[in-house]
Image (spheres, helix red, strand yellow):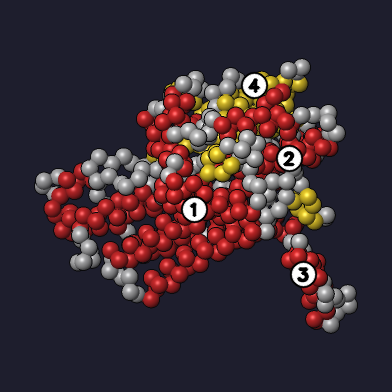
């Protein structure tokens, strides 16, 4: 296993292809360092003996110990550990840990490449290609990102019907030794500091969309690929430093007639498998969300409770109600993810067919519970901010800058007039409002709300998944029976529930 130092060394050797604010920048540019420190936490914590079970696993490919972020889930314990590892790390950095896209991308491609080869009856070697790529990925302890979201052009048109054929990443040319791709993936988290960019389709595809059914992986500085990055750093602190300074980046990843050799291609034209890959990645990612969003809930709850304490209103009943609301959302999201892990199987849900065995035996979390948890907690994002805003009052919006507190003319006056709770040092109260201002009033705080709302798929996407996969018809039959209508069935659900339990 590698270290944070090894990771930074690799980044320092990569070619420049990342544009920021009109300039080409290095991976190790100072602007990237907060994000690198955030991802670096996944290396530092994996080294600690007490985290071995949670943060490492034995590779089913090599038998070697690897970082869990590069592991393929072999059983339900792996799914539980992934959820708990994500919550633990997100607590430590106070937000997104930035490495889950890799584990979710690799787990989805691992399964789909296997099924695509099976359908092609040996005519393709996608799965073998992927296993070779994955073996190196695991051995070198690389950081992967997953580029799924396309620019999508006109939302009402499907890929092959778009006026711009590159509105979804597509295969432009097939050559003897590889493919040429064009298009642009957007909002790709941590692509600017990832070793490898894993590319997969965004949506269900038709036969005529087959050129859009493409999956591959390239190094982050690959020829023919350019990145335009937005970097989300908090306002730097010089005097009153935070305990941890998190950072994040998101890239537009542009493929400009980019050549990808066959050994790095994991799907090329199988439109049905392309659609399953899009759904499966979303599913694994929504499962990750059941670890990260509860951690964000932990931070929000601590923040709301401290805001109440600084204001000395913590014993008021309206505060209790609001704290309970955050706890309920947080733990319901966690419970949904826990159940999704517990019911995990090497199976996927096919609309109209039900759950069917899928892939070479690795574990996939239960779809209903992943989607229910992500949707519930994703929709709560702005309500949680409202609670924080309500309890804290207007202070975070206009809190003076740190150097004013260090200024000899106004510093003491500021501490005197910002002190609220007589039982807490004024310095701690000021430090808390600076922190909460980062959450409620900074551009990064705003970005995080959008990420927490849409990341893993907008709520409507989960609602579509839930309603197409849930057995609503049986519930209708049950109610028809109870209501005394025709077509009712008292046993519509009972035998299925019993069968599911014994599986
Ligand atoms: C900070 C951040 C980080 C992210 N990181 C990643 C990442 O690492 N990798 C990645 O692949 N993606 C990433 N995403 C993308 C995320 O998954 C998408 O934002 C999300 O899926 C929504 O897609 P969109 O932004 O294109 O919104 P849109 O799809 O444009 O949605 C806008 C609205 O239009 C509606 N709409 C869209 N299409 C239709 C239609 N056909 N019919 C009816 N209504 C429609 C939607 O329901 C929504 O209400 C990230 C997003 C953010 C904000």
Query: How far, Cα to Cα, is label 1 from label 2?
Result: 27 Å
Query: How far, Cα to Cα, is label 3 from label 2?
Result: 30 Å
Mark 1 or 4 closer to N-term?
Answer: 1
Query: Cβ–Cβ below 8 Å for labels 1 and 2?
Result: no
Q: Which residue is mark 2?
A: 112
What mark, if any, has residue 498 been given in the picture?
3
Q: Residue furthest right?
A: 486
Residue 321 x, y percent position in the rendering? 43, 72
Q: Which residue is mark 1?
A: 87
**Mark 3 surroundings: few (<14), some (14-19) or many (≥20) residues within 10 A:** few
Residue 458 x, y percent position in the rendering? 60, 50
Quarter of the image with the C terminus in it? bottom right
Residue 132 visible in the snapshot: yes
What mark, if any, has residue 18 been given in the picture?
none
Tell me which residue sits at (69%, 46%) in the image: 362
Ligand 1 has an atom within 8 Å of the beta carbon of the residue at disc 4 = no
Q: Which residue is mark 4?
A: 258
Query: How far, Cα to Cα, is label 4 from label 3?
Result: 52 Å
Query: Cβ–Cβ below 8 Å for labels 1 and 4?
Result: no
Vertical comparison of 491 with 427: above or below = below
The residue lying toward the viewer, choosing from 447 and 5, is: 5
Foreground mark, 4 or 3?
A: 3
Asked which secondary structure carries label 3, the reply is helix
Residue 177 x, y percent position in the rendering? 73, 17
Query: How far, Cα to Cα, is label 4 from label 2?
Result: 23 Å
């Amino acid at each position: 296993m590698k270290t944070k130092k090894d990771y930074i060394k690799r980044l320092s050797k990569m070619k420049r292809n990342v544009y920021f604010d009109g300039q080409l920048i290095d991976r190790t540019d100072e602007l990237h360092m907060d994000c690198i420190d955030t991802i670096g936490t996944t290396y530092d914590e994996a080294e600690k003996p007490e985290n071995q079970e949670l943060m490492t696993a034995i590779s089913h490919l090599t038998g070697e110990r690897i970082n869990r972020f590069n592991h393929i889930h072999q059983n339900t314990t792996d799914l539980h550990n992934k959820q708990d590892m994500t919550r633990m790390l997100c607590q430590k950095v106070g937000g997104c840990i930035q490495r889950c896209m890799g584990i979710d991308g690799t787990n989805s491609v691992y399964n789909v490449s296997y099924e695509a080869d099976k359908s092609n009856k040996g005519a393709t070697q996608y799965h073998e290609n992927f296993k070779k790529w994955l073996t190196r990925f695991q051995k070198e302890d690389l950081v992967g990102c997953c580029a799924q979201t396309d620019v999508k052009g006109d939302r009402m048109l499907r890929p092959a019907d778009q006026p711009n054929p590159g509105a979804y990443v597509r295969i432009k040319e097939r050559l003897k030794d590889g493919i040429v791709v064009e298009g642009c993936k957007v909002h790709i988290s941590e692509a600017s500091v990832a070793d490898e960019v894993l590319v997969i389709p965004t949506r269900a595809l038709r036969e005529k969309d087959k050129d859009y059914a493409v999956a591959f992986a390239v190094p982050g500085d690959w020829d023919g690929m350019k990145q335009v990055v937005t970097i989300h750093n908090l306002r730097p602190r010089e005097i009153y430093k935070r305990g941890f300074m998190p950072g994040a980046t998101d890239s537009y990843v542009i493929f400009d007639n980019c050549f990808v050799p066959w050994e790095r291609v994991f799907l090329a034209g199988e439109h049905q498998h392309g659609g399953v890959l899009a759904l499966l990645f979303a599913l694994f990612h929504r499962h990750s969300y059941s670890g990260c969003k509860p951690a964000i809930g932990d931070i929000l709850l601590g923040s709301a409770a401290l805001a109440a304490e600084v204001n000395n209103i913590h014993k008021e009943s309206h505060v209790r109600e609001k704290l309970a609301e955050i706890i309920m959302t947080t733990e319901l999201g966690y419970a949904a993810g826990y159940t999704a892990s517990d019911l995990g199987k090497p199976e996927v849900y096919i609309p109209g067919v039900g759950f069917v065995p899928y892939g070479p035996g690795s574990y996939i979390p239960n779809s209903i519970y992943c989607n229910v948890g992500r949707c519930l907690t994703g929709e709560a994002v702005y309500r949680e901010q409202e609670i924080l805003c309500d309890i804290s009052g207007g202070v975070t919006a206009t809190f003076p800058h740190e150097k004013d507190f260090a200024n000899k003319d106004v510093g003491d006056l500021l501490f005197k007039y910002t002190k609220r709770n007589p039982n807490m040092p004024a310095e701690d109260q000021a430090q808390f409002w600076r922190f909460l201002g980062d959450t409620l009033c900074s551009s990064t705080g705003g970005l995080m709300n959008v990420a927490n709302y849409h990341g893993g798929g907008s709520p409507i996407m989960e609602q579509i998944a839930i309603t197409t996969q849930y057995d609503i018809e049986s519930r209708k039959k049950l109610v028809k029976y109870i209501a005394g209508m025709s077509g009712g069935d008292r046993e519509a659900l009972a035998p299925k529930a019993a069968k599911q339990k014994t599986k």
